[in-house]
Amino acid sequence: MNPAGLSWGRYPLPRHQTIVPLHWRDTALPTCEGMLLAHGNGRSYGDSCTNDGGVLLHTRGLDRFIAFNVETGILRCEAGVLFSEILELAVPRGWFLPVTPGTKFVTVGGAIANDVHGKNHHRAGTFGEHVRCFELLRSDGTRTLCSRTEQAELFRASVGGLGLTGVITWAEFSLQKISNPWMEVNTQRFADVAEFLALSAESAADYDYSVAWFDCAGPAAGRGVFMRANHAAADTVAGPAAPRRRLRVQLTPPISLINRATLRAFNAAYFHRNRAGRSLQHYEPYFFPLDAIGNWNRIYGPRGFLQYQCVVPMADANASLSALLGKIRSGGTGSFLAVLKVFGDRPAAGILSFPRAGTTLALDFPNLGQATLDLLERLDDIVVAAGGAVYPAKDARLKRERFQRYFPNWEAMLPHVDPRFSSGWWRRVMEQ
Amino acid sequence: MRKILIVGATSAIAEATARIFAARGDALFLVGRNAQHLQAIAADLGVRGAPRVATATLDVTDFGAQAAVLEQAERALGGLDIALIAHGTLSDQAACESSIDAMRREIDINAVSAMALLTVLANRFEARRQGTLAVISSVAGDRGRQSNYVYGSAKAAVTAFTSGLRQRLAKSNVNVLTIKPGFVDTPMTSAIPNKGVLWAQPERVAAGIVRAIDRRRSVVYLPWFWAVIMLIIKYIPEPIFKKIRL
């Protein structure tokens, strides 16, 4: 957890939160005043994991494995277990996460509540698709086993349900078989969005994973690096070892270190560092490059940053992405990291699941106050017009009307929301 | 594979230590008060690699019941190589100042119960002429301070007891390790607000415990800087000590 139950973007700053650590999955919820919200490792960017004026139920103490079948790869564990802890356990035994986001420092409960996706969405869907069942603890004290066959609607409301349906105490899900910890990575450069889309289409059948970094700062904005990969074959000999994590941002600098000049320099360096070709990599740098720098979120300074992740339909993806890129470039700083990925066309696992057919773009912006909020509104104009959506786990500023456009099924959530559970994000998007 | 008994196995430090043992493939016998919590930990340790994990419930202040549980542990694992005594409560100092019963209860839980367990274990380990008795004492036992001198007295007793026991068992090839953690962020200390830079996570303390057991250390401060802090605190002259708040 971050200090005082902050989110990863450290914006908006929550006030007057009481933090209650949970340690045992069989104990009742604490008796206290105020609205409740489970908070895992605080890797959601905005305010979906914070609870102004309420109580955060800190779940990291629920970090026990319950059962692991090494034959079938089915793992049951408590909800506060981190993906990094699952990898430590499973990789030496020949198993890997079915789906993982770009950081391994998320909890299982958080991965379900945000129905997280990864570089293999086009093949494997979201994490929620691999969840077999979980226990949901509600504020009335009841414990409900939810699966696709039992309490199926509550299951669909809780997967991607942003913690609004209660506390997930434990979950059971399937891992995927691997032969070794290595990735066979094929890197390609692209000059513009059209080339990115062509590479994605061409790679979908042969590569389990694909993702692109996208330059949206410099004069050559629109170019990028496309990284597609598969888990290495069984006969792979002696790949590289896991890198040792050694960097850590120890202090929050007084101002953001991310500005127009550093962004341009970084983006140019990144582009030139990544040459086209094949390489054998350990899974860590392929999946979790930013995890190598502890507390990297601090580089944005005390005001924090806003992440913006949207998805736009494939039909006019090129036009929508070009429009977004134009807005970002004219809007000032550009984005430190821009990530592009084509989602697969799969039915959503949860009522409020974000991934859907189309191309997703994720951006980080230092918080420059109103200017940043205005820029994100303009990006929203493009996303709304395109019929896309914005990812709640990254959101810190969406209002009711646009939330409802992005999630037309939102009313189906309402009967399942626990009356004692809420979040900063939920109160904002529900505000009349 | 070593055979390890842990008393107070549901404490955060003990659980973190047990996970390291489990990942190494050690067999474990866990003793605590809450059967369900013991079961949850046992299942976890099994997944992490422990070939065998058995549990028993015990209220450590039930002195009459201790011997049977120790017997059960030896039978379940087929002997013992390491015993880690890790149970304890963080005393309510104010309550101990106004109630003799509360004070005595804290001494029973934090000192007498551990000394009773060690009395039995010492004889068994001495007879087998091998193994390690690792006992969690505390930096609080190094010098009585107004903020928690009842807890400190109990831990001082444990420190002195294990020191003597170490000397006695050295000739039998049995190591006695006195573990002195500083501030550790656990459920036991969750009521303490504003944890500063001196606070350590239980995983760090656990790694230090395992290292000290492996190296057959006598006394270990965890993290290490508490050795320096306590050295200074121990040598503050009484006239000054009386005027400051610690």
Image (spheres, coloured by chain):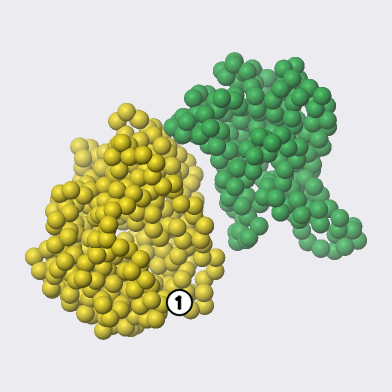
Chain colours: A yellow, B green
Question: Is there any visible trace of residue B139 in the rendered image?
Answer: yes
Name which residue lies at 35% across and 30% down.
A70
Crowding around mark 1 (Cα neighbors within 10 Å: few <14, some 14 to 19, many 20+) is some
Q: Chain of mark 1?
A: A
The residue lying toward the viewer, choosing from B121 and B154, is B121
Name which residue lies at 32% across and 34% down.
A73
Residue A22's place in the image compared with A90, above or below, is below
The quarter of the picture where the C terminus of chain A appears is: bottom left
Looking at the image, how many numbered discs can be counted on the residues? 1
Q: Identify the amino acid type marked 1.
A: Ser
Name which residue lies at 32% across and 69% down.
A271
Residue A251's place in the image compared with A85, above or below, is below
Judge from the rendering whether residue A13 lies leftward or rightward of residue A184; answer left or right. Answer: right
Residue under circle 1? A256
Q: Residue furthest left?
A: A315
Task: Residue B154: name its quadrant.
Answer: top right
The residue lying toward the viewer, choosing from A307 and A79, is A307
Name which residue lies at 29% across and 48% down.
A184
Q: Position of residue A26 (x, y in %)?
A: 44, 38
Task: Residue A64: name its quadrant.
Answer: top left
